[in-house]
Amino acid sequence: MVKIAISGKGGVGKTTLAAMLAYLFAKDGYTVTAIDCDSSINLPTVLGVENIKPMSELEEIIEERVKGPLGTFRYNPKVDDIFEEYSEKNEFGVRVLALGTIEKGGEGCFCPQNAFLRAILRHAIFKKKDVLLLDMEAGIEHLGRGTARGVDLLIAVIEPGMRSVETLRRIEKLAADIGIERIAVVINKYIDSEGAKKLIEEIERDAEILGKIPYNQCFIEADLENIPPYKLNCEIEAFERIKNRIVEIIS
C-alpha cells in the first residue's frame, strides 16, 4: 500500500489536490482512505461526505486509550476499530476520516488527538492496492510534530512565487529530520510567464515537480456550489498526469 501526505501553506490548494487524487485513484480501482488532518475540516465536504464525526470528538475513547498517568500519552493505543466505526464512504467508495479541531478557547494542547492520529497511521492494516492520502494541516508545523512520519511520499503544494521556494526548502529540511525520503512538488494556480519558468528552474535543481495545475475559475465555482471539483471536471487532465506520475515513482 502507499501512504501519501499532502502539505502546504493555507490556501494553496492541498485539499483540492487530495480530493482529486482520491477520486482518480478510486476510479482506477484502488481502495482509498483519505484523512483530513487539518483542524479546519474541509476534505470531507470536498469529497461529497457530510456529517462526519471528527476523531477529536471521541473524547472518552481518546481519554481511555491515549492518556496515561501524570499527563503522559500511550504510544500504542488501540485503534484498529476506528477506520470502520468512525469513517464514511462517498459515492466512489473513498473512505473519509477527519481529525477535527478544538472547539473552545483555552482547552489546551491538541497533543492527545495528534497522538491518536499517529497511532492510526502506524497500525492501520492495508492491502497492496490501497492508497492512504493525508491532507495535512495548513502550514508545515505538523512536520515538526512528526505526524507525517513514515509516509512513502510527501507532496508539497505551492503557488508561483519565490516565497514558495523558501517554504519548500523548509519542508525539505523538516521532512528529512523525520526520515521522509521522497518529496515532490505540485505547482497550483499556475500561469505561464517568464517568472513562473524561472521558479520551475529553481525548484528542479533539487526537487521533482509532479505537475502544474493551471489557474482555473472552475474551482471557485465548485466551492461556491459546494460540490466536489471532479464533478465539474476541473482540470482533470492535469490531475490525471500527476496521479500517473505518482504511480510511476512509488511503484
Image (cartoon, rainbow, N blue to C red):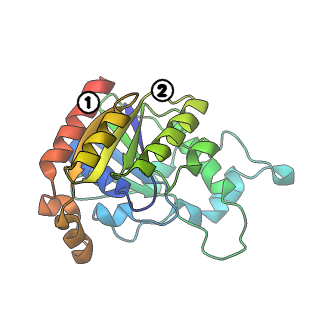
The answer to whether residue 72 shows anywhere in this view is: yes
Between residues 56 and 216, which one lies in front from this camera angle?
216
Q: What is the quadrant of the N terminus in the image?
A: top left
In this view, 57 is above or below 81: below
The residue located at (28%, 36%) in the rendering is 210
Using the image, determine if residue 150 lies above or below residue 239: above
Secondary structure of the residue carrying numbered label 1: helix
Quarter holding the C terminus is top left
Residue 80 image point, x, y percent? 52, 43
Q: Amino acid at mark 1?
A: Val
What residue sits right under mark 2 in the picture?
Answer: 181
Q: Position of residue 57 (x, y in %)?
A: 57, 66
Give the number of the disc on residue 78. none
Q: Residue at x 63, y 45 (%)?
A: 145
Say which of 194 and 156 sits in front: 194
Say if residue 94 shows up in the picture. Answer: no
Residue found 23% across the figure and 39% down from its top? 242
Mark 2 element type: loop
192 lies left or right of 161 = left
Mark 1 lies on residue: 247
Query: How crowded is the residue under tag 1: few (<14 C-alpha within 10 Å), some, or many (20+)?
Result: few
- Identify the amino acid type marked 2: Glu
Question: Residue 234, percent across and down?
Answer: 16, 58
**Label 1 to label 2, Cα distance in Å?**
16 Å
Residue 51 appears at what percent x and percent y?
39, 71
Query: How many residues crowd mark 2 within 10 Å: few (<14), some (14–19), many (20+)?
Result: some
Is tag 1's residue or tag 2's residue first in the polypeptide sequence? Answer: 2
